[in-house]
Image (cartoon, rainbow, N blue to C red):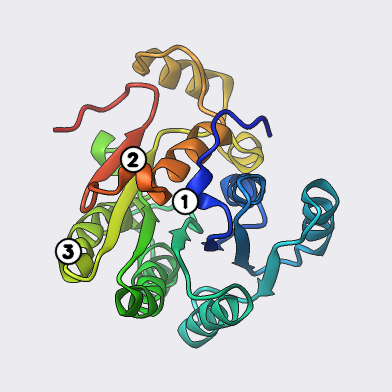
Amino acid sequence: MTQTATFHDLKGKSVYITGGGSGIGAALTDGFLAQGAQVAFIGRSDASAFVDEMAAKHGRAPLFIQGDITDMDALQGSIAQAAAAHGPLDVLVSNAANDLRHDWQTITPQEWDRLQSINLKAYFFAAQAAGKMMTQRGTGSIINFSSISYMMGNTGYPAYTAANAAITSLSHTLAREMGASGVRVNALAPGWVLTEKQLDKWATPEGLAAHLERQSLKTHLVPQDIVDAVFFLASGASRMMTGQCMVVDGGVVATG
């Protein structure tokens, strides 16, 4: 990953990322380490090789906590573990999500609940755990990944679009809840970022061409585009920005 900007105030910060071992999450882990932050992340799959790669690259390893974010005790316990290792959290990035395609006519209540536990429930309970320590200290930044999918009215994954609309609203509410204590909460809504997963599972030449036609900027998004935006929201550069949904999509949707 090529570093495009240095945010000096991120050096030494305690950063926790959900899903920080793959896709955009891995780029976030790499990027925050490059900024000098102390990074912990949770992931369901073994990320030992990635940790070794980061240690070789940056001279220090991120703290990998293997666990399932749909287990709320494990999720909140991993946040406590990160704080014990690196100090109380300065930055929480809730990134992990599952955009599994499904049919609105056949999805079962059990499947719906499973997707919401990943795409929404974990976001609240991660913010609850991180927010408690942040409000006690009077500082912190919580960044919740949303998506432009619900703004576009996309079809094919209603559980995902519903969750992302809720994340944007949740972030606004939590910003009100925590703002008096100096804690900022924002949502970040990426467009279609061409991670390995997206290319393997969902991208087709026709779909990519159609989406690019909708973008004002005629270049596909890559993880670095999202990482840079997260740095801004995590740093003091955005110190008076809270309760907002920041869109990074190459100019597909309009907000405001």
175 vs 19, left or right, is left
- Give the Cα separation between the discs numbered 1 and 2: 10 Å
Residue 236 rendering spot, x and y as whole percentages = 37, 48
Q: Amino acid at mark 2?
A: Ser
Instruction: From the image, tell me which residue sits under label 2.
Output: 149
Instruction: Report helix, strand or loop for mark 2.
Output: helix
Q: Which residue is mark 3?
A: 173
Quarter of the view holding residue 237? top left
The answer to whether residue 53 is left or right of residue 224 is right
Measuring 67% from the left and 57% from the top, which residue is drawn there? 21
Q: Amino acid at mark 1?
A: Asp
Q: Which residue shows up at 75% across the image and 62% down it? A: 47
Secondary structure, mark 1, is loop
CA–CA distance in space, label 3 to label 1 = 24 Å
Q: Nearer the viewer, mark 3 or mark 2?
A: 3
Instruction: Tell which circle, 3 or 1, labels the residue nearer the N-terminal end.
Output: 1
- Mark 3 residue type: Thr
- Provide residue 211's location: percent of width, then percent of height: 42, 22
**Which residue is label 1 attached to?**
99
